[in-house]
Each structure stands twice: as C-alpha cells, then as structure tokens.
Amino acid sequence: MRFWGYWVSADRDDLEVVAGEFDDTDLSDHSDWKEAWQNEDPEYAHGFLDPLTMLHDLSKRITGEIDAGDLEAAADKFREGTPFPVNDLEALARLIQLLIPKALPRSAMLQLPNPSLTNDGVDIPFGK
C-alpha cells in the first residue's frame, strides 16, 4: 500500500522537506503507522503522513523542543493577548510548537474532551 507524505532530511544546519510516497513497510508502529523512522538518526522520524506533525518536528530541529512548563507559560501569555514577536526562524519555530503540539496517538486523542488553545469560548483546535 502507498501513502503520500513528507520526507525530512537534515545535513548539519540545512533542513529539507520533500513531498513523496511511503510504502507501508516504511511506517512504524512506534507512531501509530503515521511516521517513518530510519537508522541514520533514530531520535527523529524522517517521514510524516501528517503535515502538522512534520511542521512540529521541523520546529524541534530548528530550536529544540520547548520544555512543557515553558510551553504552558507561553500559551497562557498568548491567550491573554500578549503579542508573540516572530522576527526570525527560531521565533517561528517556537510559535509552531506553541500552536501545533506533537500529535498524540489517535487512541489518546479520543480521550481528550476538546483540546484547544483558548478557554474563552473561541476554540483554536489543535492536535486533531
């Protein structure tokens, strides 16, 4: 079976995304069959079916993964209306992690009531 998705490669500081196909044997049960992992760098997935998960992964490669406490504090400030300046690639990567958290496995997602970034009645859905 063939699937369309995104291959991500990194060579030092250069990141590259290529749209392409996956064979079902490329995908891993580690990610509920939505990501491809390779031996060259086992800490990172290299193939993604979901574009939002791919963007989150790219942001981690650019700026590192934001600590959960720091991410929660940033989300609180963002909800309060504090501007989030985006004036370079690292700031954009942090914004991506703020708005697009790593996708949860589908089984865990079904247990969440209605994940959103706001609690003021206007939902910004994420992770679905």
Image (tube, rainbow, N blue to C red):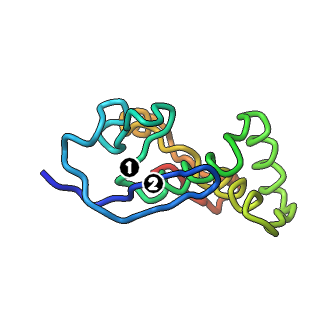
Disc 2 and disc 1 in contact, CB within 8 angstroms: yes
Residue 2: percent from left, percent from top? 17, 55
Determine the residue positioned at 37% across, 38% down: 37
Residue 56: percent from left, percent from top? 56, 51
Amino acid residing under circle 2? Val
How far apart, in angstroms, are the residues tagged by discs 2 and 1?
6 Å
Characterize the local packing of mark 1: few (<14), some (14-19) or many (20 or more) Cα atoms within 10 angstroms: many
Give above or below for 109 relative to 75: above
Q: In this view, does 1 lie to the left or right of 113?
A: left
Amino acid residing under circle 1? Gly
Q: Which of marks 2 and 1 is nearer the N terminus?
A: 2
Determine the residue positioned at 19% across, 40% down: 25
Q: Could you say whether the residue bearing mark 1 is in a helix, strand or loop?
A: strand
Q: Which residue lies furthest to the front in this view?
A: 12
- Residue toward you, 8 or 51: 8
Q: Residue beneath label 1, please? A: 47
Residue 6: percent from left, percent from top? 38, 58
Q: Residue furthest left?
A: 1
Determine the residue positioned at 75% across, 49% down: 75
Q: Residue beneath label 2, please? A: 8
